[in-house]
Image (cartoon, helix red, strand yellow):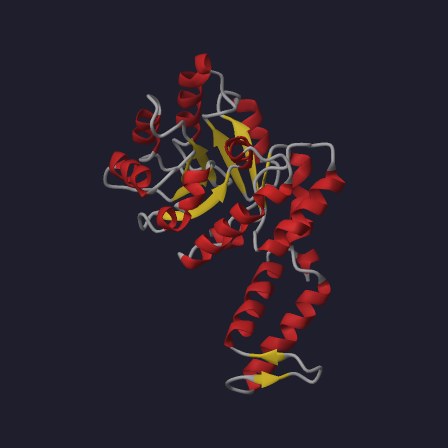
Amino acid sequence: MTAADCLTWLYAPGDRPAVVAKALASGADVVLVDLEDAVAPDRKRYALDATADLLATPPPVPVHVRVNALDGPLAETEVRRLAPLPGLGALRLPKVTGPAGIRRVAAWTGARVPPLYALLENALGVEHAYAVATAHPAVTGIALGEADLRADLGVTGDAGLAWPRSRAVVAARAAGLAPPPQSVFPDVRDTEGLARSCAAGRALGFLGRTAIHPRQLPVIEEAYLPTPAEVAAATEVVRAAATEAGALALPDGRFVDAAVVAGAHRTLALARRCPQGV
């Protein structure tokens, strides 16, 4: 599964193997094992050991690991130990502020540089979003870490994050990467609020979302899967494009060109991942 196919990314604390095991069985597209914020300082070593044991063989679901701060004392050891393991799907790099951090991690990995996902969690990281996205061939995606970003910017509502969100989407697409997933929705009980937030994120160009509880996964998937009406419209576009070359107009007046056709193919590809999306 590629980044462009993923809709649900579930965090689990690295020092709680039982929770990680439940996450692997949750139906999430990707499990994000966290060695950073979710792990207390005195549990960091245990979390690394447990995660290395998990990744000694390929798990049933892609596993990405969020390491500790790149300028701190733990990240290099974590990266060097985890990068060669056959079960590692990718590394998630917190609080990236520019290309230098990405290149430093790539140097730590040695011969095998795994896919890298950069988290932009402060103003400087957002300013350098495109430079981060293109810093190294191993960069597979970027995303916002909105809790830290809110604190850094001093904003309390979504209005203050509108520009950083669009900036992340534009930078990812300009770099040829998949659209970024939305940051976590912190209230695991408010599924209606989560659905509304996902709808807003989808309208901005995000694709999928990170989650902190399995109950959030079906809400995220439903919000991001194409609706039957969207699938029908995309099917009509693809069929029309197959019979006529170049730009054309559909019977209902919609204008279709190569970009519209490409978007229709993406819609149908996303719908095929789940029968209820068709």
Please state if 264 lies on the left or on the right of 121 as rendered.
right
Position in image of residue 119 (x %, y %): 45, 39
Position in image of residue 139 (x %, y %): 37, 47
Please state if 252 lies on the left or on the right of 73 as rendered.
right
> At 33% from the left edge and 27% from the top edge, which residue is drawn?
71
Position in image of residue 95 (x %, y %): 42, 34
> At 60% from the left edge and 65% from the top edge, which residue is drawn?
268
Q: How many marks?
A: 0
Please state if 210 lies on the left or on the right of 113 as rendered.
right
Nearest the eye: 242 or 230? 230
Can residue 148 be seen at all in this image of the molecule?
yes
> At 55% from the left edge and 64% from the top edge, which residue is drawn?
266
> At 30% from the left edge and 27% from the top edge, which residue is drawn?
76
Quarter the C terminus occupies: bottom right
Position in image of residue 128 (x %, y %): 39, 45
For residue 22, what is the image quadrant? top right
Nearest the eye: 141 or 278? 141
